[in-house]
Image (tube, rainbow, N blue to C red):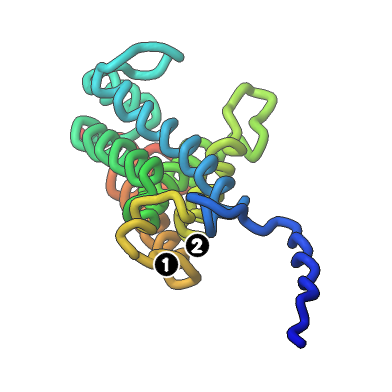
Amino acid sequence: MADTTSSPPEPAVLGSPPSGSFDGLTGVDIGLLVLRFVIGIILLGHGLQKLGWFEGGGYPHDMGTQAEFLKLFGYSSTSLLSWMLVLTEVGAGLSLLLGALTPLGAAGGAGIMFQAVAGYQWSGGLFGDSAGAVGYEFALVFFAAAIALGFTGPGHLSVDQVLGWRLSGIRWGLAALALAVVVGLVVLVGFGVGLGGTPAPPAGP
């Protein structure tokens, strides 16, 4: 006689994904989406603001004022540098928002923050100084968060995932970190500010 006794239901595993259209989605994927969205929208917003899409916050609202703003920090060739900055902000912002070519977007965002930390904000220290110089705490947080995305990848809810691109792991993270540092150093040294935020000496007569 066949055994008709039904087996007890399998116990629920804490943190296991629910059945349905979100099979395979985890809390890590949601966390990465939140992180990507916040960093991406801020980078994209700053880039679009420099292109004149909106004003506010005391930040440059067109390419002319952006070039003048960079001169205040000792940069040279500020028109070229402004376009490099805007294209990087817009490109990195879109990359992280969509989770498309994520290590490249992470490198772009981290490179911008690296040159801020190692450049004009360095003299203010981590939290700023008594003279009113701005510290590099916030730029450092953005730098670390962007590099973290280079290592982790964008998560399940991303263009990279849809296209089957496995752009995550130690190699991709280290590549994003190296690219960010190299580009940041090129900006700092090549455009006259130098490490530590010391402006280039004035040209002689």
Residue 188, placed above or below residue 12: above
Name the N-terminal-most of marks 2 and 1: 2
Residue furthest front in the image:
1
Which amino acid type is shown beneath numbered disc 2? Phe
Q: In the image, residue 56 lies at what x, y percent?
A: 41, 12
Q: Residue at x 57, y 38 (%)?
A: 136
Crowd rating for badge 2 (residues with CA inside 10 Å; few <14, some 14–19, many 20+): many
Tell whether 35 sits left or right of 18.
Answer: left
Residue 38, placed above or below residue 151: above
Q: Quadrant of the C terminus?
A: top left
Crowd rating for badge 1 (residues with CA inside 10 Å; few <14, some 14–19, many 20+): many
Q: In the image, residue 11 lies at what x, y percent?
A: 78, 64
| Residue toward you, 200 or 138 | 138
Q: Is residue 200 visible?
A: no
Q: Which residue is mark 2?
A: 151
User: Which numbered disc covers residue 172?
Assistant: 1
| Residue toward you, 47 or 158 | 158
Mark 2–mark 1 contact, CB under 8 Å?
Answer: yes
